[in-house]
Amino acid sequence: MPNPLYDALFARHADQDTPFLHLPDGSTMTHGQFIDTASRYANALTSKGLAPGDRVAVQVGKSPDALALYAACVQAGLVFLPLNPAYTPAEVEYFVFDASASLLICDPGSIGDLVDVAANNQAELETMDITGRGTLRDLAAEHGHRFATAERTENDLAAILYTSGTTGRSKGAMLSQKNLLSNAEALTKAWQFSKTDVLLHALPIFHTHGLFVATNVMLLSGGAMVFLPKLDADQLIRFMPRATTLMGVPTFYTRLLAHDDFTACLTAHMRLFISGSAPLLADTHTEFEERTGHRILERYGMTETNMNTSNPYDGPRRAGTVGLPLPGIEVKVCDPETGETLPDGDIGVVEVRGPNVFQGYWRMPEKTAAELRADGFFITGDLGVMDDQGYLSIVGRGKDLIISGGYNIYPKEIELLLDDQPGVMESAVIGAPHADLGEAPVGVLVAQPDAALDIEAINTALAGKLARFKCPRALVVIDELPRNAMGKVQKNLLRAQYADVFAL
Ligand code: MCA
Ligand code: AMP
């Protein structure tokens, strides 16, 4: 049965004894073993009554089995819905409810918190721990490794990835098989990946960067990955001799540079270092080149679009820019009011069109219409400028968004919770520069008349509701929020005022 994404990424590796995942314990999983594992999971999932198009929410730690679940969903025509393990039960409940997920797979340690979430939403519940063990693996073990691949077209959904929204309500970006496959093809070619490549993989696999950019490119090229549970600079250094390439968010590069053992000698054999998900400071780029002789290749993308632009593999990699549009993808910088394309050198909103652009937001037609134009251009909300050679620079954000260590944090979501805390009259959340994470959230609070704010209690209340990475790393109290004539909070003034809050 045709299934374009499965056929291109997975089917051709069946029975191959070439290495796919090198694990930190020294073991290796071959391509063939990975495909067999995935097919057992596909059998397990369908034995639970799941049918093509059903959503499978997955909140588990990084492991080969967790990655095989992605392949299993593609093979069975299910819609993969990966979730950050840091999300609280309340956050998970929203995703399971909104997506009408048929199945939730979670860590066994979260069962107590999530059993009601699943039951309230008529979802089945299975477990998988960070080693891959759990009820789902037990079920998969009862099945063979042959599975009749579900028929899919390139327009069918492969995944829904949630991105937070400016209103505080997360939106599910619907990604078709074609969205994912076209981008994997473009990136594999642009970055010249081949089966001789070994990628150091230390990114999470619940976001576009670690899941689609990294994994899909390696599957398409037939290469291997050193599959590490998370970023640990010691581990990156230990395994670098086995690798040819690294993909990371800017924090990967600043942490490597802070390590004394990170030397030119260690990286001499490396073919390529790629950065994205957040701005790479030009200083980091320069320092990296001075230390290693390698020029980091920076690219730019979004959950809704996969990757849009990239600095060239052959050709000038310009620090501070995100490079040129990828082949087949149109990128323009537009006037935010009129939507007209602006001349080179003018700052405007970046819009993109191509086979990479998503199918819209799950069950949110108004939000889709607001961001996806009828002519197919997606309004990214990023502010950019194009130079006369077609290189794009991201110079800011039209949307109120904080990017901390590559994770997106929408201030509105935190402000709504802060405003509910005893004694708080109003709040504003801003991003302040942070040496390790690029930026991190700061909550600015105004107390009700005569109220004394209990900062510790507020921090505790937030920690119960929000994933830790979203919790403000500093809470400050001021008399009133600066506002413009229209009454809008002037966050730029707050950002300037608290620019040094993490430097002290
Ligand atoms: C962890 N913590 C964070 C972050 N990560 N706080 C703010 N921002 C973060 N990014 C908190 C934890 O909650 C914990 O808090 C404490 O820091 C230590 O946690 P740990 O797990 O040890 O953190 P870490 O190992 O230092 O992780 C930092 C990291 C990681 C390496 C930057 O967050 C990471 O791998 N980020 C990559 C994210 C990513 O893949 N983004 C791509 C999105 P406490 O101590 O209070 O409990 S896709 C995308 O953006 C588009 C499509 C694109 O272009 O790629
Ligand atoms: P997400 O919603 O997690 O997919 O994050 C996408 C956002 O990350 C984009 O809209 C940009 O604001 C930002 N981003 C990704 N790559 C880069 C980059 N290389 N430079 C600056 N911002 C980036």
Image (spheres, rainbow, N blue to C red):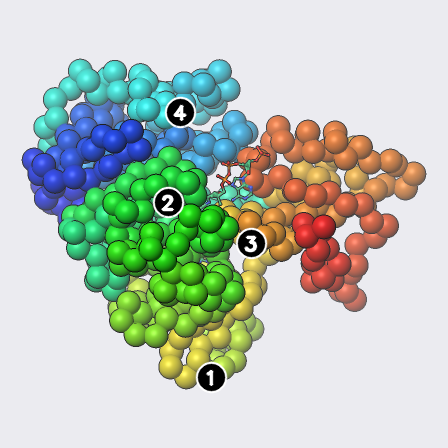
Q: Provide residue 503's location: percent of width, then percent of height.
A: 68, 52
Q: Earlier in the sequence, mark 4 or mark 2?
A: 4
| Mark number, residue 106 | 4
State which mark lies toward you, 4 or 2: 2
Residue 397 against residue 75 in the figure, above or below:
below
Q: Residues within 10 Å of mark 3 (few under 14, many from 20)?
A: many
Q: Provide residue 364's location: percent of width, then percent of height.
A: 46, 48
Q: Are marks 2 and 3 in contact (CB under 8 Å)?
A: no
Is the residue at mark 4 in contact range of ligand 1, meaning its CB lies under 8 Å from it? no
Residue lying at 45% horizontally and 18% vertically, measured from the top left: 109
Q: Residue furthest right?
A: 450
- Quarter holding the N terminus? top left
| Mark number, residue 237 | 2
**Measured Cα–Cα span from mark 3 to mark 4:** 30 Å
State which mark lies toward you, 1 or 2: 2
Q: Which residue is mark 3?
A: 438
Q: Provide residue 422's location: percent of width, then percent of height.
A: 79, 33
Q: Earlier in the sequence, mark 3 or mark 4?
A: 4
**Measured Cα–Cα span from mark 1 to mark 2:** 44 Å
Q: Earlier in the sequence, mark 2 or mark 3?
A: 2
| Mark number, residue 343 | 1
Residue lying at 10% horizontally and 28% vertically, measured from the top left: 146
Q: Earlier in the sequence, mark 1 or mark 2?
A: 2
Q: Earlier in the sequence, mark 3 or mark 1?
A: 1
Residue 234 visible, this orientation: yes
